Structures are given as structure tokens and as C-alpha cells.
Image: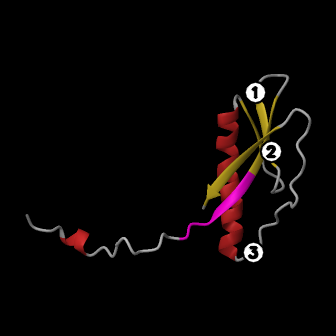
Amino acid sequence: MSQDPKRSELSISSDSPPAAVPTFPCIVYVTNLSTGGVHARVANLAGIDAEAENEREALGKIVPEFKRQVGQLVANGDPVPWIDPPAKPGPDEQKRFVPVHL
């Protein structure tokens, strides 16, 4: 059987170190709304929040915006304005930790 030429050009070996993929902490506080649905807000980066019918949809709105904002800052060489320590959760909020890869 002949070897695929594309495969032989890859420089992958068991000795190759894993690629460095930046990961950023997205701390999200989620609360149920009295009118139905949920509200989610990022606790460690200002200005990102969302309302949705359920937690999954809310996080589905939060994470892309978090990724966009952090990615743009990193690409421009600007520091990320983390809120450190993060805002404290309200009495009805639950904390979620979402590691985000750019």
C-alpha cells in the first residue's frame, strides 16, 4: 500500500509538545426570572449579560460575546480589564465557570 503524500508531510510525533491554546475564565452568574426564563451576567468582565428562555440559551449568548471581546483585546495587544475580584453573586444567582478558548 502506498503512503499518502499529504500524510507524510505532517510533522507530528509523540515528542511534539501540545499547542498552546489560550483559555480565559468566564465567570457567569445565572438567575431565574419571575416572569420566566433566566438572566445571566459575566462577573469578571463588565458589560456582558443576556436573557433567554433557559440557562443553556443564555450561556449560548454570553460565551460568543465574551470570546469576541477578549479576542479583540488580545489581538490588539490590549490588557483585558478583568474585574478582580469578580463581582459577588446576588442572593438568587448561581455561579457557573466556563473556560473559554479563543
Q: Amino acid at mark 3?
A: Asp
User: Which label was assigned to residue 78?
Assistant: 3
Dot 1, crowdedness within 10 Å: few (<14), some or many (≥20)? Answer: some
Establish if 15 lies above or below 26: below
- Tell me the residue at 72%/48% (across/down): 97
Locate residue 22, reporting x and y percent: 61, 66
Q: Is residue 24 left or right of residue 1?
A: right
Q: Residue furthest left?
A: 1
Disc 2/disc 1 C-alpha distance (Å): 14 Å
Locate residue 52, reporting x and y percent: 72, 33
**Magenta stretch contains residue 48:** no
Establish if 98 lies above or below 72: above
Q: Is residue 98 left or right of residue 28?
A: left
- Tell me the residue at 86%/60% (across/down): 83
Locate residue 24, reporting x and y percent: 68, 60
Mark 2, residue position? 41
Mark 1, residue position? 37
Foreground of the two, 41 or 98? 98
Disc 2/disc 3 C-alpha distance (Å): 23 Å
Q: Residue furthest front?
A: 15
Image coloring type: secondary structure
- Tell me the residue at 88%/32% (across/down): 92
Give the residues drawn in magenta, as a range: 20-26
What secondary structure is found at the residue carrying circle 2?
strand
What secondary structure is found at the residue carrying circle 3?
loop
Tell which circle, 2 or 3, labels the residue nearer the N-terminal end.
Answer: 2
